[in-house]
Image (cartoon, helix red, strand yellow):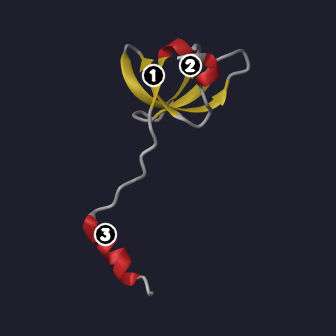
Amino acid sequence: MLKHNVRVGSTYIVKVSGTLAKVRISREHARGGWYGINLATGREIRIRTAARLRFEVPYAAPGISPDEARRIVDKIEF
């Protein structure tokens, strides 16, 4: 991945300690790179180069069960 493609606030697959993990980029570092939160452990990590980033994780809205959706629809007055 290239440096100009990285967006703060997005989630990426990143190579962390030899394994791939989901990391949300939280802010830029003053000397280059970014800080991110490892979503599996909750720890903050520094990503020094864009080479550690594999690809952006597409946003997925949190799903609800069909039963929960039916209860919500039943409560709505038309």
Against 30, residue 61 (above or below) is below
Closest to the observer, 22 or 77: 77
Residue type at tag 1: Val
Name which residue lies at 44% across and 34% down. 57
Against 35, residue 67 (above or below) is below
Name which residue lies at 31% across and 69% down. 68
Closest to the observer, 57 or 23: 57
Name which residue lies at 45% across and 22% down. 14
Horizontal placement of 30 versus 48: left or right? right
Find out whether the residues at labels 2 and 1 contact each other: C-beta distance under 8 Å.
yes
Going by the picture, which residue comes out furthest to the left? 67
- Report the Cα–Cα distance between label 2 and label 3: 39 Å
User: 10 Å neighbourhood of mark 3: few (<14), some, or many (≥20)?
Assistant: few
Q: Which mark is residue 68?
A: 3
At numbered mark 1, what does the secondary structure look like: helix, strand or loop? strand
Going by the picture, which residue comes out furthest to the bottom? 77
- Report the Cα–Cα distance between label 3 and label 1: 34 Å
Instruction: Give coordinates of residue 26: x percent, y percent.
Output: 60, 34
Find out whether the residues at labels 2 and 3 contact each other: C-beta distance under 8 Å.
no
At numbered mark 2, what does the secondary structure look like: helix, strand or loop? strand
Q: Which residue is mark 1?
A: 14
Residue type at tag 2: Ile
